[in-house]
């Protein structure tokens, strides 16, 4: 047992500030004591996240959010054992706010600092100790679906992860948000498409699925198809969107779910792994959650669907990843920097999460 894990009770404070949510959480080992998220409604009027406004809002939110998280956990800051923060991927200005804050806490309290990959954390959210949410057994497949990523990851152990498929253009969250924008819905439109879809007919408007070889995805063609479809129908009937909102949303969601399920089925066939976890903001989608649950009886899969509050960005998942990282690899150095294009395997690649709008 390394020196920093000599206590059986490890209190981890985590900070997540990669995009437009400022979040802080305190975990006792792998159990959540508090998880506070402050959203940034300012972006709604711009139809997407404005990086400069996001980092300013993080600066305003971070002190109260961390304070509330520590208070809610019922501990004092002197009891903290370590501090984890999101190193990337994300927006540079946003990452810097959380990262600098975490470093100052680490220095002031003389506790280990742990840099965490946001996308790994979406996967490791499944290892938070929650009643009714069993932890996946290794190896398993993780479908990470968020505003900036769409990946199928083979997870062999806590930190041995391999991307076996990913989007070649837009992320699935972008497909939801951009479709919503076409329908005149505010940002982020994903949850609204989900809401309207629940009242609609998923087969009302058949959209074509893209033909992408192997385990990769593409969503930009679907977005264009929806744009032309809406433009054509609105030209004929200016009330088309209002009159058909639920059916359009249900049809879009149905198509997206089919695209994801087709690739998951292929991934299971190729790897022989039947344990499937989902993570990331889009895993909050009620249709995706339902379809995956049904796959248990339909295909004999064991599925892991995260508790709702650990789907969209939150610091509890960063703390969970931090606790395992400290245990298996030890702390990071204080010289660790923000990496906007951090890939799941640790290298810096150009992804579409950083600078997304
Ligand atoms: O993981 P996340 O909070 O942030 C990123 O890491 O990007 O994911 C945000 C994305 C947004 O695109 C948002 O529209 C989408 O998750 N989202 C949903 C739902 N809730 C959030 N998409 C579809 N249905 C939902 N219920
Ligand atoms: Zn995320």
Image (cartoon, grey):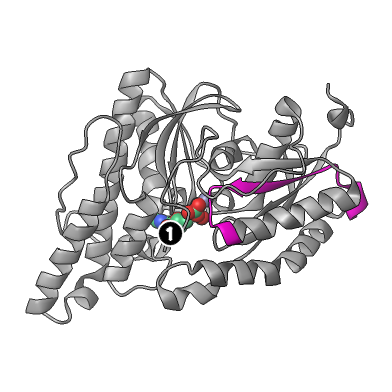
- Figure quadrant of the C terminus: bottom left
The location of residue 313, given as percent across then percent down, is 56, 54
Residue 23 on the magenta segment: no
For this orientation, the residue located farthest to the front is 335
Magenta residues (range): 76-93
Residue at the (86%, 47%) spot, across then down: 80
Mark yes or no: residue 130 visible: no
- Figure quadrant of the N terminus: top right
Residue 81 on the magenta segment: yes
Quarter of image, ligand 1: bottom left
For this orientation, the residue located farthest to the right is 78
The location of residue 169, given as percent across then percent down, is 31, 48
Task: Give the structural element (helix, strand or loop) at label 1.
Answer: loop
The location of residue 259, given as percent across then percent down, is 26, 42
For this orientation, the residue located farthest to the left is 236
Q: Is mark 1 within 8 Å of ligand 1?
A: yes
Q: Is residue 142 left or right of residue 35?
A: left
Residue at the (74%, 37%) spot, across then down: 332
Query: Which residue is at the front of the view, 128 or 89?
Result: 89
Q: Label 1 belongs to which residue?
A: 356
Mark yes or no: residue 287 visible: yes
């Amino acid at each position: 047992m390394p020196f920093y894990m000599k206590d059986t009770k490890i209190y981890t404070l985590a900070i997540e500030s990669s995009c437009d949510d400022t979040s802080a959480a305190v975990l006792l080992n792998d159990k959540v004591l508090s998880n506070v998220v402050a959203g940034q409604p300012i972006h709604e009027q711009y139809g997407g996240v404005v990086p400069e406004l996001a980092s300013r809002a993080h600066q305003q939110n971070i002190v109260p959010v961390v304070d509330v998280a520590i208070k809610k956990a019922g501990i004092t800051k002197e009891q903290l054992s370590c501090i984890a923060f999101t190193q990337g991927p994300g927006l540079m200005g946003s990452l810097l706010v959380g990262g600098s804050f975490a470093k100052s806490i680490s220095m002031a309290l003389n506790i280990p600092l742990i840099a965490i990959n946001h996308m790994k954390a979406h996967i490791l959210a499944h290892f938070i100790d929650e009643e009714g949410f069993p932890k996946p057994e290794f190896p398993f497949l993780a479908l990470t679906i968020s505003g900036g990523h769409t990946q199928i990851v083979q997870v062999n152990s806590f930190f041995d992860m391999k991307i076996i498929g990913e989007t070649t253009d837009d992320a699935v969250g972008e497909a939801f948000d951009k479709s919503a924008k076409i329908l005149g819905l505010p940002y982020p439109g994903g949850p609204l498409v989900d809401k309207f879809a629940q009242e609609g007919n998923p087969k009302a408007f058949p959209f074509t699925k893209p033909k992408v070889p192997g385990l990769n995805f593409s969503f930009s063609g679907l977005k264009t198809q929806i744009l032309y479809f809406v433009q054509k129908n609105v030209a004929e009937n200016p009330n088309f969107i209002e009159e058909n909102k639920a059916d359009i949303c249900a049809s879009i969601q149905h198509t997206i779910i089919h695209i994801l399920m087709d690739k998951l089925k292929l991934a299971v066939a190729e790897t022989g792994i039947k344990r499937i976890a989902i993570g990331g903001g889009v895993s909050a989608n009620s249709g995706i959650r339902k379809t995956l649950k049904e796959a248990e009886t339909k295909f004999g899969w064991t599925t892991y669907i995260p508790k709702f509050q650990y789907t969209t960005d939150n610091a509890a998942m960063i703390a969970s990843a931090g606790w395992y990282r400290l245990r298996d690899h030890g702390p990071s150095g204080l010289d660790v920097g923000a990496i906007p294009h951090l890939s799941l395997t640790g290298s810096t690649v150009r992804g579409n999460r950083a600078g997304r709008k």
